[in-house]
Image: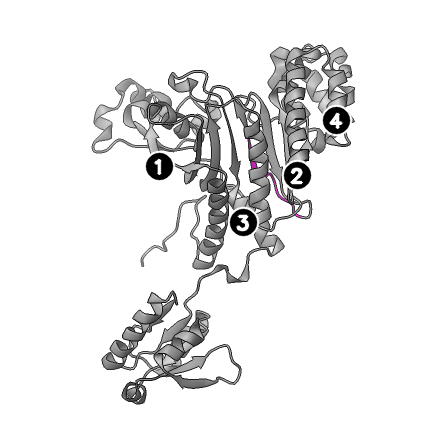
Amino acid sequence: MAQKPSIPKGTRDFNPDQVAKRNYIFNTIRGAFETFGFQPIETPSFENSETLMGKYGDEGDRLIFKILNSGDYLSKADESAYNGKDSNKLTASISEKALRYDLTVPFARYVVQHQNEIEFPFKRYQIQPVWRADRPQKGRFREFYQCDADVVGSDSLWQEVEFIQLYDTVFSDLKLDGVTIKINNRKILSGIAEVIGASDKLIDFTVALDKLDKIGEEKVKEEMLSKGISEDGISKLQPLFTLSGSFESQIESLKSILDTSEEGRKGIDELAFINNAITELGLTTAKLQLDVTLARGLNYYTGAIFEVAAPKTVQMGSIGGGGRYDDLTGIFGMPNMSGVGISFGLDRIYLVLEELGLFPETITKNVEVLFTNFGDEEALFSLKAIKQLRLRGINAELYPDAAKMKKQMNHANKRNIPFVVLVGEEEMASNTYTLKNMLSTSGEQFKVSLEELISKLK
């Protein structure tokens, strides 16, 4: 007995309805990207291993899918690594390529490789799948799409302002009201660490601070103490634990905390600039919120940090994020190329729209009319009409086999096709078509000419 087929864990099949809904999100995001002046690029599904390895830290390296070399890959394997069961050394000798882990590192490679063809600042967007050998769980997959937009070659804070507007535009177009765009700045976090004498423990400090909403003030303080941050330093953080109110009032509170840190004051100035601009320009449905506990991507973000939260009525993690980086291309020998970018979490956005019932009913472009098939002569007569309907943008198809009427009608019902056209000897003789409305409870049908048929279907 043949084994039942399956797909790898962490991957998914998508039915026509799901693909239509995903395309709705893709098209909305793509339309906004292009409205804001971003240009599309695409990079290969797999890169040379040296392009990816060592760019995501030890954990990231373990999650990269490696591709075995073609042919007899073991013939060139490192014998000592093979005998010693040293998987890292062995992998390097039998795998020269790997599936891309994200779109950012391939983008950095693209910029360096094509720097003489690119006009800077360069605004690019990319919507492609990525792969991670992660442990599959709810909302986390091994194959998924990323939707990224970046600007490289500009230090201007107007880019951050535009990205906030871009987020607002996309979520407004998706009718997803109540989204919160959270913002912080790496310089503020560095400044706070400096003020409390923990500059060498920036990551430990921010990882603990990031848990404030989850575990509370006392547990955060305990974690900081366990990481070697002094009690005196933690006491200086007290105003942070109660920081609330408007964007402007939080900025004022931060000024008193960071008055001795030049780096921290720079971060405050940058946030104030962005907030003032957004206040003047206004947002359609989203809200901009300062969140000093936001610390994502600290190993590469150098300025603004973004994270987008779904409406509070939905239990969902972040549905977007990004930030400013000062040296995207330095890893490939092209230093001092500043940039800023954001991404949209397609799968989570899908789940939110589904839960809130926000997908338009007309999203699936279904077949509008099915022509029955009672034989070759009737089929050919029908196909001539179908050709004219398709030329006018009407989705039409012929039932492929000559079959009993009941079977063909059931097929139309199961596929939710609203109209069926019956063509028999009588219709061919009079050059007419019998149009049946499948949505009508009375099962009404009437004879029409080709022009009348086109008119009724349009």
Q: Is residue 321 magenta?
A: yes
C-beta proximity under 8 Å, tags 2 and 3: no
- Find disc 3 in the rendering and name its residue: 350
119 with respect to 338 (left or right): left
Instruction: Tell me which numbered mark, 2 or 3, is placed earlier along the sequence.
Output: 2
Which mark's residue is nearer the viewer, 4 or 2?
A: 2
Where's the C terminus, which quadrant?
A: bottom left
How would you classify the magenta stretch by its main secondary structure?
Answer: loop
Crowd rating for badge 3 (residues with CA inside 10 Å; few <14, some 14–19, many 20+): some
Q: Is residue 455 visible in the rendered structure shown here?
A: yes
Task: Look at label 3 and name its amino acid.
Answer: Tyr
- Find disc 1 in the rendering and name its residue: 45
Instruction: Tell me which numbered mark, 4 or 1, is placed earlier along the sequence.
Output: 1
Which mark's residue is nearer the viewer, 4 or 1?
A: 4
- Find disc 2 in the rendering and name its residue: 282
Q: Position of residue 185 (x, y in %)?
A: 62, 23
Instruction: Tell me which numbered mark, 4 or 3, is placed earlier along the sequence.
Output: 4
C-beta proximity under 8 Å, tags 2 and 1: no
Magenta span covers which residues? 314-322
**Residue positioned 21% across, 26% down in the render:** 75
Write down the quadrant of residue 3 in the picture.
bottom left
256 with respect to 362 (left or right): right
Task: Look at label 1 and name its amino acid.
Answer: Ser
- Find disc 4 in the rendering and name its residue: 250
The span from disc 4 to disc 1 (Cα, nearest Å) is: 44 Å
Crowd rating for badge 4 (residues with CA inside 10 Å; few <14, some 14–19, many 20+): some
